[in-house]
Image (cartoon, rainbow, N blue to C red):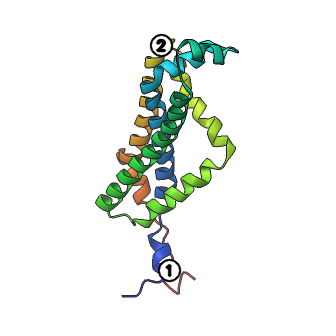
Amino acid sequence: MAFSVKDFLARLNWRQVVIHALAFWFFMHAFETLYYLFNLEIISTFKASGNSTKKLLEEQEVTVEDLSLFLIWQTLSGAIGWLTALFLSIILSVKQRWFWLNVIFSLFLLLLLLRVPVWSYTKHLFYYPGRLFSNSITEFLINGGLLLTLGLLLFFLKPINRFIERGAFHLTTSSDEL
């Protein structure tokens, strides 16, 4: 069975690619934000430190190893977030009978978006609701929960899925329309 470029292009759905890439982004930042809940001591030290970070870290007995592990796991938690979103996207695509390569294009789009500096500033817009609270636990729960909820809505909200289903790119095959 031959698979032509025309068939390939007909199955691409740019609505799914863009919406799922955004969902990946929300998942990635949700997992990073929720990870902070496991390191409240380090976070609190940095929040309270001002210019005397080194002194406060020594007083709190936070070691270089603790800081290194914090940074490594913070990065890994973001990767775990987009891997989770990738897994959900694949399951949803199979269930909805959408072309599975749309998911791969979503991942590539996410990686491209992460190279654009504007997106690193955009995440701070979603951190404002949690900043209304002085308690770090509440702040991270609200921010992480908001980001995760937005990502889940992009995957599972019926109007969004209907919007995706209507968006497949269809090439005209009739000679009358050419």
**Is 19 on the left or on the right of 118, as rendered?**
left
Q: How many numbered badges does the structure rendering display?
A: 2
Q: Amino acid at mark 1?
A: Lys
Q: Residue 90 location in percent, x, y?
A: 36, 58
- Badge 1 marks a residue whose secondary structure is helix
39 with respect to 126 (left or right): left
Cα separation between marks 1 and 2 = 55 Å
In the depicted structure, whether residue 157 falls above or below residue 167: above
Q: Residues within 10 Å of mark 2 (few under 14, many from 20)?
A: few
The residue located at (48%, 37%) in the rendering is 73
Frontmost of labels 1 and 2 is: 2
Residue drawn at x 44%, y 31% is: 35
Above or below, 128 against 104 in this view is above
In the image, 98 versus 169, the foreground residue is 98
Looking at the picture, tell me which residue is in the foreground, 99 or 136: 136
Q: Amino acid at mark 2?
A: Asn
Disc 1 and disc 2 in contact, CB within 8 angstroms: no
- Label 2 secondary element: loop
In the image, residue 125 above or below residue 3: above
| Quadrant where the N terminus is found in the figure | bottom left
Residue 160 visible to the viewer: no
* Between 96 and 57, the one nearer to me in the picture: 57
Query: Which dot marks residue 6?
Result: 1
Q: Position of residue 170 (x, y in %)?
A: 48, 72
Q: Position of residue 3 (x, y in %)?
A: 43, 83
Task: Give the residue furthest to the right.
Answer: 51
Q: Position of residue 19 (x, y in %)?
A: 48, 51
Task: Give the labeled residue for mark 2.
Answer: 135
For the question of whether residue 104 can be seen, the reply is yes
**As drawn, which residue projects farthest toward the left?**
95
